[in-house]
Amino acid sequence: MKKKKVVVLTGAGISAESGIRTFRDSDGLWENHRIEDVATPEAWRRNPALVLDFYNQRRAQLLEVEPNAGHRALVDLEKNYDVHIVTQNVDDLHESAGSSQVLHLHGELRKVRSDRYENLVYPWDKDVRLDEDRCERGAQLRPHIVWFGEAVPMLEQAAELASEADIFIIVGTSLQVYPAASLMIYAPRHIPFYYVDPKPQVNWELQQMPGLVVIAEAASTGVGKVVEMLGG
């Protein structure tokens, strides 16, 4: 018997419980940096050394954190469902927990790519050095991150997954960052929707879903409740 497809959209809230700070909880600052200084193409052109240093620190931080109960509950869900995670996060905590199908909308900290040839992408666990670490065609390597103002290349694939969903779960996101926040509009309206967040903000797109269940809890407890409801 074919398993039902569950599509899960996760945001910064699920990673925050593992100790990864989010910029939207601190007046627009991310680890004491303005977003405009470390997460835009203009910042990269203006001060690539600062940008590289920022992401080098974020990459190193991944070695100090572990998946939490929210991540692990989504792994448990795979026992009875075909689970596809679409995450706005650039960490690899879903993979570390054991999730087998993870799509990163905004890139991955543990990868880098060529500044000039965007299809040249490499796994990367160490610091990236300015003027030293280059792709095979000689261009500087940059973080494999989708910065503000850049296109989201995985959005089409994520939308296709959403359109095939039998169940849609949203975890730990304020639903304020578009286009990710509108992903659920591609899903069938009649299916069950679950929204887990300690401070849920039901945006216009979610208001259109008649099968919406809101669980106003952190991911570490709320996701487990959803899995229990689904018999995961």
Image (cartoon, grey):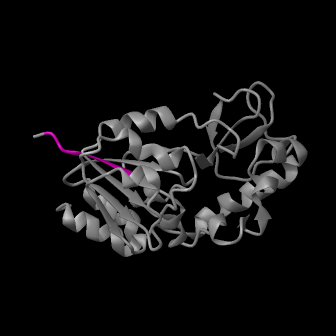
Can residue 102 be seen here? The reply is no
Work out whether residue 59 or residue 39 is closer to the camera in this orientation and state it.
39
Asked if residue 95 is positioned above or below residue 61 in the image, the reply reads above
Query: Where does the magenta region start and end?
Result: 2-8
* In the image: residue 204, left or right of residue 22: left
Work out whether residue 147 or residue 207 is closer to the camera in this orientation and state it.
207
- Can you give x and y, in whole percent of width and height, for residue 35 in the image? 75, 57
Q: Residue most toward the left?
A: 1
Q: Residue at x 38, y 45 (%)?
A: 101
Find out whether residue 4 is within the magenta segment: yes
- Quarter location, residue 132: top right
Q: Residue at x 69, y 45 (%)?
A: 147
- Can you give x and y, in whole percent of width and height, for residue 215 in the image? 34, 70
- Can you give x and y, in whole percent of width and height, for residue 45 in the image? 86, 41
Which image quarter holds the C terminus?
bottom left
* In the image: residue 220, left or right of residue 190: right
Q: Residue at x 64, y 46 (%)?
A: 124
Find out whether residue 6 is within the magenta segment: yes
Work out whether residue 129 or residue 199 is closer to the camera in this orientation and state it.
199
Q: Residue at x 52, y 62 (%)?
A: 174
Which image quarter holds the N terminus?
top left
* In the image: residue 168, left or right of residue 102: left
- Quarter location, residue 130: top right
Asked if residue 93 is positioned above or below residue 139 in the image, the reply reads below
